[in-house]
Amino acid sequence: MLRSALLVRASAARAGLQLRSQLPRMPLLTATTMPTSLAATVLGTSAAATSRSYTTSKTPKALTPEQRETLLKPLVDGSGDWELVEGRDAICKQFQFQDFPAAFGFMSHVAIVAEKMNHHPEWFNVYNRVEITLSTHDCGGLSVRDIQLANAIDAAAKSTKLVWA
């Protein structure tokens, strides 16, 4: 085993390659290492509440008619600008930023929050545009998780170089 490792290192050195173990280690920001204040700011909660998981291990339930009226309606009919997706129980929204770094920064911000919530969006990015679709696959449609993530996404967009949403 040691001989194999030495041969691999020698071959890599001859090829001018660095092995991963020789590369400088960069700190990785993940949901577990992310400051809870970041997620608290985006989600509008206290840092103590943010340190807890937002989801349970139970399968999420689809929105009830009452939840659709009180939670979903303000997003799609109010100033939220989210749209219902035709042919499926989902919502989507398009964002345009000043440039690619702003769009990518926004996506990175949302990715950290989504990981913390354990609920991940479907998204599509071209240059400065990002299109996000939310639906909970476990329940076959919209759930409270989608509403929470949509609100977090809107908050993240407000803190970025947004041209229009």
Image (tube, helix red, strand yellow):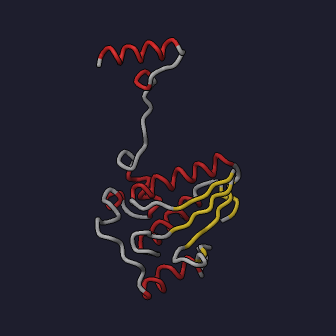
Quarter containing the C terminus: bottom right
Q: In the rendered view, tell whether residue 104 sits above or below residue 48.
A: above
Residue 80: image location, x then y, percent:
59, 73
Quarter holding residue 4: top left
Quarter holding residue 28: top left
Front in this rendered view, residue 84 or 74: 84
Q: Is residue 31 left or right of residue 109?
A: left
Q: In the rendered view, tell whether residue 133 sits above or below residue 129.
A: below
Q: Is residue 70 left or right of residue 157?
A: left
Q: In the rendered view, tell whether residue 74 sits above or below residue 15.
A: below
Front in this rendered view, residue 49 or 73: 73
Q: Residue at x 63, y 49 (%)?
A: 102
Q: Is residue 150 left or right of residue 128?
A: left
Residue 123: image location, x then y, percent:
57, 59
Front in this rendered view, residue 6 or 128: 6
Q: Residue at x 54, y 77 (%)?
A: 88
Q: Residue at x 46, y 52 (%)?
A: 112
Numbered disc total: 0
Residue 121: image location, x then y, percent:
50, 61
Quarter containing the N terminus: top left
Residue 13: image location, x then y, percent:
48, 13
Front in this rendered view, residue 40 or 34: 34
Quarter holding residue 154: bottom right
